[in-house]
Structures are given as C-alpha cells and as structure tokens.
Image (tube, rainbow, N blue to C red):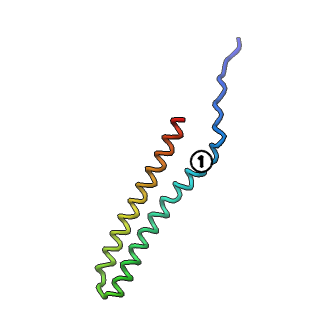
Amino acid sequence: MASFTPEPKKPPKNAPLRTYRMLATASSIGMSLVVAIFLGLFGGMWLDKRLDTRPLFLIIGLLLGITAGFRNVIVISQRIDKAQREEFDE
C-alpha cells in the first residue's frame, strides 16, 4: 500500500526579504523607545539649565519622552501587524 504525503508548500521567492524587513522593523521598537525617552530627558535638563527652573522641565520632558516612546512602539507594532496580515492573506 502506497502512502500519500502531500508536498509541502514552498515559501514565496521574496520570503527571506520579508523576514529581514520584519526583523528590522521589530528591532527598531526598542531603539525608538529609548531614543524618545532620552531626547525628552536631556531636552528637559537643557531647558532647566537655561531657564533655571529645576526640575520642572526635566519632569515634563521625561513624561513627553515616555509618551512619545510608547506611541512609537504602538505605531511600529501596528505596522508589523499589518504586514503580517497582508502576508497571511497572500
């Protein structure tokens, strides 16, 4: 009796390129979070030094940096999710 095993689907030709794009996008999540927080922090420190208002702008800058960083994480995550859905639909 012969057994029938279906032939596995071959990945599309551009599958490695998609994988590298996805990895590059995913790796930018952490970097964008850290950069936004540090920009807010150092911008607040700079303003505090210039205006002699310690720690007012430090706190404001830090909060703005954290907010911007998490917004970046959400945007990048949505971009990854959209790319995965488009890949799945193909």
Whether residue 72 is situated above or below residue 48 in the rendered picture: above
- Considering every residue shown, the one lying at the far top of the view is 1
- Considering every residue shown, the one lying at the far right of the view is 2
Q: How many marks?
A: 1
- What residue is shown at x 60% (from left), y 51% (from top)? 20
Q: What residue type is labelled 1?
A: Thr
- What residue is shown at x 31% (from left), y 78% (from top)? 57
Label 1: which secondary element? helix
Residue neighbourhood size for the residue with mark 1, other residues' Cα within 10 Å, grouped as few (<14), some (14–19), many (≥20):
few
Q: Is residue 51 left or right of residue 24?
A: left
| Rendered location of residue 10, percent (x, y) | 65, 34
Q: Is residue 60 left or right of residue 78?
A: left
- Which of these two is toward me, 38 or 83? 83
- What residue is shown at x 64% (from left), y 38% (from top)? 12
| Rendered location of residue 68, percent (x, y) | 38, 64
Q: Is residue 12 left or right of residue 52?
A: right
Whether residue 11 is situated above or below residue 19 in the rendered picture: above
Q: Quadrant of the C terminus?
A: top right
Residue named by callout 1: 19
- What residue is shown at x 29% (from left), y 85% (from top)? 53
Q: Quadrant of the N terminus?
A: top right
| Rendered location of residue 70, percent (x, y) | 39, 60
Q: Based on the displayed image, in which of its 4 quarters is residue 14 positioned?
A: top right
Whether residue 49 is situated above or below residue 65 in the rendered picture: below
Whether residue 42 is situated above or below residue 73 in the rendered picture: below
Q: Is residue 68 left or right of residue 85?
A: left
| Rendered location of residue 15, percent (x, y) | 62, 43
